[in-house]
Image (cartoon, rainbow, N blue to C red):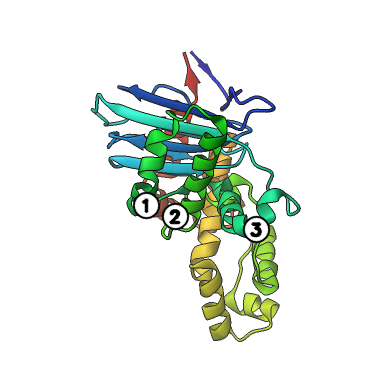
Amino acid sequence: MEESRVIHEITPLMGKDSLYIADRRKKEFTYPIHNHEVFELNFVEHAAGVRRIVGDSNEVIDEYDLVLITSPDLEHVWEQNTCTSDDIREVTIQFHFDLNEEGFLSRNPFMSMRKMLLEARKGLCFPLESIMRVYHLIDTLSSIKDGFYAVTQFMTILYELSRCDGARTLATSSYAKVEVASDSRRILKVKNYISKNYQEEIRLTAMADLAGMSPSAFSRFFKLHTGRNLSDYIIDLRLGYASRMLVDTAKSIAEISYGCGFNNLSNFNRIFKKKKNCSPSEFRENYRKTRIIV
């Protein structure tokens, strides 16, 4: 038995191809954890109990699951776990679009799609209501013989998803190695500071001064722009770096804890378990199990 790095999948999508669509029925998930250069929209139904790992996100899915991934470095896998269904359906659509600011998707009609695709560098999971909104389009996509109509239907799927509420990112920014970006220069300034100094103590008053605001005004401003208060944002960032180190290094959990800005090992263990539903050692062990090739 040999431990392997994450498999880098060479996909069937060739230079002039627009889409690769795989629509299959199966009884179990067996493909190991992997990443790939191309973008991917993956739909799964009748697979309650399957464990979905995307970066440092580890969740058990319900009857329906729809995830968009647009990073070549973000590893992912669907594992059988406790799923007993013998009629699993998986529709995988692989594609690639130019997300440069001068590209076609930067034009006004496609702006919501481009924003969604950029967000999906961390993995983007859609709620059931959104899945049902595009279900009939995904359901029939593989039966379309004309490539042009297949692409236009797929673009409609992406557009409809980009207009839905409730999609949530899966991996943390620090784990997914995604640079922070924001419409607000002030919030970007704060995020960049936190990203560079996450190993040190970071105080609310210092961040408020950096943004040129009072602490109370800054707290409201930060939560409005990030959806989280400052302390939760810092903890999530530190946990992302810690998770990446648990996977990529042989450092001890204590070393990782202190190296990521936690000054108390038991506090790190408690927060990690609360946020990830497992201890740091369990996270490391479970992740390594997904990387074993026999």
9 to the left or right of 99: left
Whole-percent x and y of residue 232? Answer: 49, 64
Residue 28, picture quadrant: top left
Location of residue 147 with respect to 136 vertically, above or below = above
Residue at x 53% of width, y 51% of height:
172
What is the spatial separation of the Cα atoms under label 2 and label 3, in whole angstroms?
19 Å
Whole-percent x and y of residue 280? Answer: 45, 43
Whole-percent x and y of residue 181? Answer: 66, 60
N-terminal label among 2 and 1 = 1
What is the spatial separation of the Cα atoms under label 1 and label 3, in whole angstroms?
24 Å
Residue at x 41% of width, y 50% of height:
126
What is the spatial separation of the Cα atoms under label 2 and label 1, in whole angstroms?
6 Å
- What element does badge 3 sit on? loop
Location of residue 283 with respect to 189 vertically, above or below = above
Residue at x 64% of width, y 33% of height:
37
Can see residue 3?
Answer: yes
Amino acid found under the numbered disc labelled 1: Pro
The residue nearer to you, when weighing 110 against 57, is 110
N-terminal label among 1 and 3 = 1
Instruction: Look at mark 2 in the image and give the residue it sits on.
Output: 167
The residue nearer to you, when weighing 11 against 266, is 11
Dots 1, 3 in contact, CB < 8 A: no
Instruction: Look at mark 3 in the image and give the residue it sits on.
Output: 180
- What element does badge 2 sit on? loop
Instruction: Look at mark 1 in the image and give the residue it sits on.
Output: 127
Dots 2, 3 in contact, CB < 8 A: no
